[in-house]
Amino acid sequence: MAIRNTSGTRRGDLGGDAPSLVPANARIVSDWDSLNGGDEIIVFDQTTGIFSGCIDALTEDREIMWLQLDSGRGRKLFMQLDGCKVWRVTSKT
Protein backbone atom coordinates (compact mmCIF):
# COMPACT_ATOMS: atom_id res chain seq x y z
CA MET A 1 0.00 0.00 0.00
CA ALA A 2 1.37 3.45 -0.89
CA ILE A 3 1.30 5.22 2.44
CA ARG A 4 4.11 6.58 4.52
CA ASN A 5 5.00 4.49 7.55
CA THR A 6 2.88 6.44 10.04
CA SER A 7 1.06 3.63 11.81
CA GLY A 8 0.93 4.41 15.48
CA THR A 9 1.87 8.04 14.91
CA ARG A 10 0.01 10.38 17.23
CA ARG A 11 -2.37 12.91 15.68
CA GLY A 12 -0.25 15.86 16.77
CA ASP A 13 2.74 14.36 14.96
CA LEU A 14 0.69 14.35 11.75
CA GLY A 15 -0.12 18.03 12.05
CA GLY A 16 -3.84 17.10 12.11
CA ASP A 17 -3.71 16.47 8.36
CA ALA A 18 -4.20 12.72 7.96
CA PRO A 19 -6.06 12.99 4.61
CA SER A 20 -2.90 14.34 2.97
CA LEU A 21 -1.22 11.00 3.79
CA VAL A 22 -3.88 8.96 1.98
CA PRO A 23 -2.93 7.82 -1.53
CA ALA A 24 -4.88 9.01 -4.57
CA ASN A 25 -6.30 5.51 -5.15
CA ALA A 26 -8.12 5.48 -1.78
CA ARG A 27 -11.78 6.41 -1.30
CA ILE A 28 -13.41 7.47 1.96
CA VAL A 29 -15.84 4.92 3.41
CA SER A 30 -18.86 6.62 4.94
CA ASP A 31 -20.67 3.42 5.92
CA TRP A 32 -18.88 0.43 7.43
CA ASP A 33 -21.68 -1.80 6.05
CA SER A 34 -19.86 -1.64 2.70
CA LEU A 35 -16.63 -3.09 4.18
CA ASN A 36 -15.68 -6.74 3.76
CA GLY A 37 -13.00 -9.05 5.02
CA GLY A 38 -9.92 -8.78 2.83
CA ASP A 39 -10.46 -5.12 1.90
CA GLU A 40 -7.28 -3.04 1.94
CA ILE A 41 -7.96 0.05 4.02
CA ILE A 42 -6.42 2.99 5.82
CA VAL A 43 -7.79 4.01 9.22
CA PHE A 44 -7.28 7.34 10.96
CA ASP A 45 -8.00 7.22 14.68
CA GLN A 46 -7.75 10.61 16.40
CA THR A 47 -6.31 8.97 19.50
CA THR A 48 -3.78 6.49 18.14
CA GLY A 49 -2.91 7.67 14.62
CA ILE A 50 -3.08 6.31 11.09
CA PHE A 51 -2.87 2.60 10.20
CA SER A 52 -2.97 0.62 6.97
CA GLY A 53 -3.66 -3.01 6.32
CA CYS A 54 -6.19 -5.64 5.34
CA ILE A 55 -9.48 -6.25 7.16
CA ASP A 56 -9.11 -9.54 9.01
CA ALA A 57 -12.57 -9.71 10.60
CA LEU A 58 -15.76 -7.70 11.07
CA THR A 59 -18.61 -8.26 13.50
CA GLU A 60 -21.92 -9.07 11.84
CA ASP A 61 -23.30 -5.61 12.69
CA ARG A 62 -20.13 -3.96 11.28
CA GLU A 63 -19.52 -2.04 14.52
CA ILE A 64 -16.11 -3.63 15.24
CA MET A 65 -13.30 -4.59 12.90
CA TRP A 66 -9.90 -6.21 13.22
CA LEU A 67 -7.25 -4.85 10.88
CA GLN A 68 -4.24 -7.01 9.96
CA LEU A 69 -1.58 -4.31 9.89
CA ASP A 70 0.88 -3.99 7.03
CA SER A 71 4.49 -5.12 7.46
CA GLY A 72 3.61 -7.96 9.83
CA ARG A 73 2.91 -5.72 12.82
CA GLY A 74 -0.01 -7.75 14.11
CA ARG A 75 -3.68 -6.82 14.38
CA LYS A 76 -5.53 -3.82 15.76
CA LEU A 77 -9.16 -3.49 16.78
CA PHE A 78 -11.27 -0.50 15.69
CA MET A 79 -14.79 0.41 16.78
CA GLN A 80 -17.10 2.45 14.57
CA LEU A 81 -18.40 4.24 17.67
CA ASP A 82 -14.94 5.79 18.15
CA GLY A 83 -15.40 7.86 14.98
CA CYS A 84 -12.43 6.54 13.00
CA LYS A 85 -12.09 7.70 9.41
CA VAL A 86 -11.69 4.84 6.92
CA TRP A 87 -10.49 4.82 3.32
CA ARG A 88 -10.68 1.78 1.02
CA VAL A 89 -7.65 1.41 -1.23
CA THR A 90 -8.66 0.54 -4.77
CA SER A 91 -6.55 -1.18 -7.38
CA LYS A 92 -4.43 1.04 -9.59
CA THR A 93 -5.85 -0.44 -12.79
Image (tube, rainbow, N blue to C red):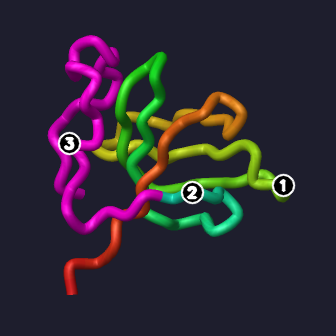
Which label's residue is closer to the chain start, 2 or 3?
A: 3
Label 3 CA crowd tier, 10 Å (few <14, some 14–19, many 20+): some
Label 1 CA crowd tier, 10 Å (few <14, some 14–19, many 20+): few
Quadrant location of residue 18? top left
Q: Which residues make up the magenta segment? A: 1-28
The residue most toward the right is 61
Q: Is residue 93 above or below residue 77?
A: below
Q: Residue at x 76, y 45 (%)?
A: 63
Q: Amino acid at mark 3?
A: Leu
* Dots 1, 2 in contact, CB < 8 A: no
Q: Residue at x 57, y 57 (%)?
A: 30
Q: Amino acid at mark 2?
A: Ser
Q: Quarter of the image for the C terminus: give it.
A: bottom left
- Majority SS type along the magenta span: loop
Q: Amino acid at mark 1?
A: Asp
Which label's residue is closer to the chain start, 3 or 1?
A: 3
* Image position of 31 (left or right of 5): right
Which label's residue is closer to the chain start, 1 or 2?
A: 2
Q: Which residue is mark 1?
A: 61
Q: Is residue 24 above or below residue 19?
A: below
Q: Nearer the viewer, residue 73 or 51?
A: 51
Q: Is residue 74 above or below residue 23?
A: above
Q: Nearer the viewer, mark 1 or mark 2?
A: 2
Q: Is residue 6 magenta?
A: yes
Q: Residue at x 22, y 22 (%)?
A: 14
Element at label 3: helix
Numbered mark located on residue 77 in the image? none
